[in-house]
Image: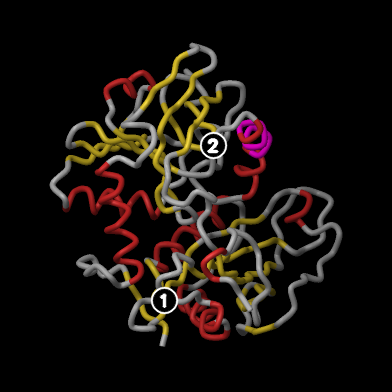
Amino acid sequence: MIDWANLPFGYLKTNSNTRCLFSDGKWGKVEVTDSENINMHMAATCLHYGQECFEGLKAYRGKDGKIRLFRWEENAKRINRSAARVGLPEVPQEIFKEMLYTLVKENADFVPPYGTGASLYIRPLMIGMSPRLGISASTEVLLILFCSPVGPYYKGGFKPIKVIVERGSDRAAPLGTGTVKVGGNYAAALNMSIKSHEMGYGAALYLDSKEKKYIDECGPANFFAIKGDKYITPKSTSILPSITNMSLQALAAKMGMTVEQRQFPLVELTECDEAAECGTAAVISPISAIFDPDENKTYTFGDQVNPGKTCVKLYETLVGIQYGDVADPFGWISFVE
């Protein structure tokens, strides 16, 4: 029996996953399996050379009992951009859709009930399978979609976290792979993630790798701040284009705010009313304070206890659309029936 109201953000075995193999220059048939394991050669390119990419999206159960997907087409587009960057083949949208919808239908019992605050997290994963010692692209590629019911990414839920500025390392290079969703970007940030948590911070805030002056990303998530009636988010050649951030920008504009995507100097935080990180996993994580150890300076936002009013409105609207409680004027929701 699953305790839906107290689910962690972690892996829980479900009924099945969907798979499709690319071989001899073409994608094969979509298959369904209950196996959680992958049989691969020890010299597979994904293991040695990091030839892989992945995605993250969610399915939600509304008050009406219907299962909803949020902007899955954007995930399909983004995994292809990531694949192209690391020499993997593009997956046709119709195959991605078949795998996605089949996965959700097969695991419908694992889509958490409405009102629990939980959702079904879906992880598409594309990996190079060909055995190689020399550096060359794999000609055999496996695409897997698996899922797990999850609770809030942060144990405290929608509550402010504290963040620490990181200057000692870079998550990604300006013209590297920061704009695509590949494992190496996350591996590069794991050490600082461990350290920041040990120091009592929820995440590390990365600055641009060239000048260490402008805000880049907040750990594994995009960053934004509220400055009066402006929604400001960094523009950089090393930031992953977040579907959540893109959606929040659209909502902010609809609310009458001015949306600015531009270089964001760290020192400008002194002028901001609210700050937050955003992404599929956490949606929005408000930030109460950002500590810069090199300057021994702390930027604080609001009363440092409660989320700011704009973050609350954006969060409630976006989550409301995802669960079907708020009208969807953008056509972001698809139903799995």
Q: Residue at x 55, y 42 (%)?
A: 177
Amino acid type indicated by mark 2: Ala
Query: How would you classify the magenta stretch by its main secondary structure?
Result: helix
Magenta stretch contains residue 192? yes
Q: Is residue 143 above or below residue 82?
A: below
Task: Please identify the quarter of the rendering in which residue 326 is found.
Answer: bottom left
331 to the left or right of 210 = left
**Which quarter shows the C terminus?**
bottom left
Please name the residue that numbered disc 2 is placed on.
Answer: 203
**Which quarter shows the N terminus?**
bottom right
Separation of marks 1 and 2 at Cα, in angstroms: 29 Å
Q: Residue lying farthest left?
A: 256
Identify the secondary structure beneath mark 2: strand
Colour pattern: secondary structure
> Which label number is shown at residue 100?
none
164 vs 156, nearest the viewer: 156
Q: Residue at x 21, y 36 (%)?
A: 230
Q: Position of residue 231 (x, y in %)?
A: 25, 39
The tally of labels here is 2
Amino acid type indicated by mark 1: Arg
Q: Position of residue 316 (x, y in %)?
A: 30, 57
Identify the secondary structure beneath mark 1: strand
> Which label number is shown at residue 61?
1
11 vs 27, nearest the viewer: 11
Magenta stretch contains residue 113? no
* Segment tinted magenta in the rendering: 190-196
Q: Residue lying farthest bottom?
A: 337
